Amino acid sequence: MRPMVLYLDFDGVLHRDAVYRAPGRGIYIRDGALFEWAHFLEALLHPWPELRIVLSTSWVRELGYDRARSYLPVALAARVTGATFHRRIHGPTRELRWHWAQTPRGRQIADDIARRGASAWVALDDAVDEFTPAQAEFLVPCRSDAGLSDLATRETFSLMLHRLAKV
């Protein structure tokens, strides 16, 4: 079986997308709680111990890889093997960070797939318009206000995992 890779966004997937960062307050969300839907992802991934996670979230650019990863529950953090943003490639200058931030999410993932050599992958993301039609086949779109709390999204993701495991 080929190893499967999940490209994971945080905002709009593991919690609502209205996340803010303020001096003295840190990272917060107005409605709900940060990572309030992460338990759904843990349950969905339980049958797939070989699946690895690549962080595909602006949290890595803003906080750094280790700190962004540390916000995940332990079981999910243990599966993380990297991120689409690499400080040495995309972050040495303000211009490179800005350019990367303006690059569509689908392109960021495609670049990472080329570097990583991933052949069986799926993305959980709410930035649906940032993926090409060809990439949409591997995207499980999330509603920004519901993410993985939405039963239909969880069912679609589960079906996608089964499909990838058979390829």
Image (spheres, rainbow, N blue to C red):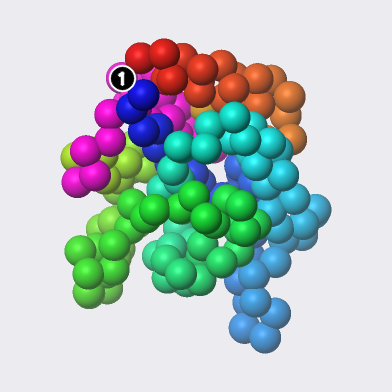
Residue 39's place in the image compared with 59, above or below, is above
Residue 22 position, x and y percent, is: 63, 77
Q: Quadrant of the C terminus?
A: top left
Tell me, yes or no, whether the highlighted magenta stretch contains residue 158.
Answer: no
Residue 115's place in the image compared with 156, above or below, is below
Residue appearing at x 73%, y 24% in the figure: 151
Residue 131: which quarter of the image? Answer: top left
The amino acid type of the residue labelled 1 equals: Ala
Residue appearing at x 59%, y 29% in the figure: 47
Q: Nearer the viewer, residue 122 or 75?
A: 75
Residue 158's place in the image compared with 11, above or below, is above
Residue appearing at x 65%, y 42% in the figure: 42
- Answer with left or right where residue 72 lies relative to residue 118: right
Furthest-right residue in view?
Answer: 32
Q: Quadrant of the N terminus?
A: top left
Q: How many residues crowd around disc 1 within 10 Å: few (fewer than 14), some, or many (20 or more)?
A: few
Furthest-bottom residue in view?
Answer: 24
Residue 12: which quarter of the image? Answer: top right
Which residue carries the number 1 mark?
134
- Answer with left or right where residue 161 lies relative to residue 121: right
- Tag count: 1
Tell me, yes or no, whether the highlighted magenta stretch contains residue 117.
Answer: yes
Residue appearing at x 24%, y 44% in the figure: 116
Magenta segment boundaries in residue numbering: 115-139
Residue 126 position, x and y percent, is: 54, 37
Residue 21 position, x and y percent, is: 61, 71
Q: Is residue 141 visible?
A: no
- Answer with left or right where residue 167 lies relative to residue 28: left
Q: Nearer the viewer, residue 81 or 95?
A: 81
Q: Is residue 34 visible?
A: yes
Residue 61 position, x and y percent, is: 40, 65
Q: Secondary structure at mark 1?
A: helix
